[in-house]
Amino acid sequence: MRTERPPVVRALVVAAALVVVTGCGTSQPAPPGAPASPVAADLSATDLAFVDLVIPQNESALAALALTATRPGSALRPVADRVGEHYRAELARARELLARAGRQESGQHEGHDMPGMITAAELAAVGTADAEEFDEHLEALLRTQAEEARTVARAELTSGTSAMARELGARVDRSRAEFLALLGAP
């Protein structure tokens, strides 16, 4: 499990991630016929960075939520079923926004151990946890993921310029707040 980062450190990590994503990422070239500009379809570099980060964050969270289906006694299963639809809708919207901008998913965060990302090693550890530890470990991962997703979404709401990307940011912020409320106090 990761150690808890202070809010200032998390904000700096998010800012650094946005700089890396927008400044020196390995994004795929636009498909033939798509606008050549990296800010096509009214998405600024910040908007593109946010949308590009939502995809792996949501994919890793959905993989974690899916683990509850393997544990019939998991207290998190009803919560996972309820919030999973929000994560899938956000994922679809993020991909739609990239497509509208003429961009492909970059995959540049694949395998990264960064705030908001649940790693394959963490998933494996939770998957092999005994019944008593399963919910505890999974909840800790999901709580951290939700908190970090809200941090990134709020950065988009503050600095993004696209109404569509900002709407996605608001949706992510609301759904993670709802998820954290369902999880209750830590």
Image (tube, rainbow, N blue to C red):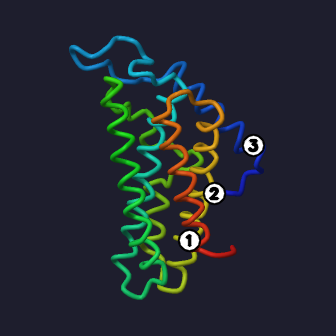
Q: From the top left corner, tell me how far across and down residue 104 is, in percent.
A: 32, 29
Give the residue type at disc 2: Arg
Give the residue type at disc 3: Val
**Between marks 2 and 1, how big is the CA–CA gap?**
13 Å
Give the residue drawn at x 36%, y 53%.
Answer: 89
> Which residue was labeled with disc 2?
2
SS for callout 2:
loop
Q: Earlier in the sequence, mark 2 or mark 1?
A: 2
**Between marks 3 and 1, how big is the CA–CA gap?**
22 Å
- Considering the image in quadrants, where does the C terminus appear? bottom right
Give the residue drawn at x 36%, y 25%.
Answer: 101
Give the residue drawn at x 36%, y 55%.
Answer: 88
Give the residue type at disc 1: Glu
In the picture, measured across the screen, residue 186 lies left or right of residue 37, that is right
- Residue 20 is drawn in which quadrant? top right
Q: From the top left corner, tell me how far across and down residue 137 is, in percent.
A: 56, 72
Give the residue drawn at x 41%, y 44%.
Answer: 55
> Which residue was labeled with disc 3?
9
Q: Earlier in the sequence, mark 3 or mark 1?
A: 3
- Considering the image in quadrants, where does the N terminus appear? bottom right
Residue 123 disc label:
none
Contact, mark 3 vs mark 1 (Cβ under 8 Å): no
- Foreground mark, 3 or 2, reads 3
Q: From the top left corner, tell me how far across and down residue 45 is, in percent.
A: 51, 22
- Foreground mark, 2 or 1, reads 1
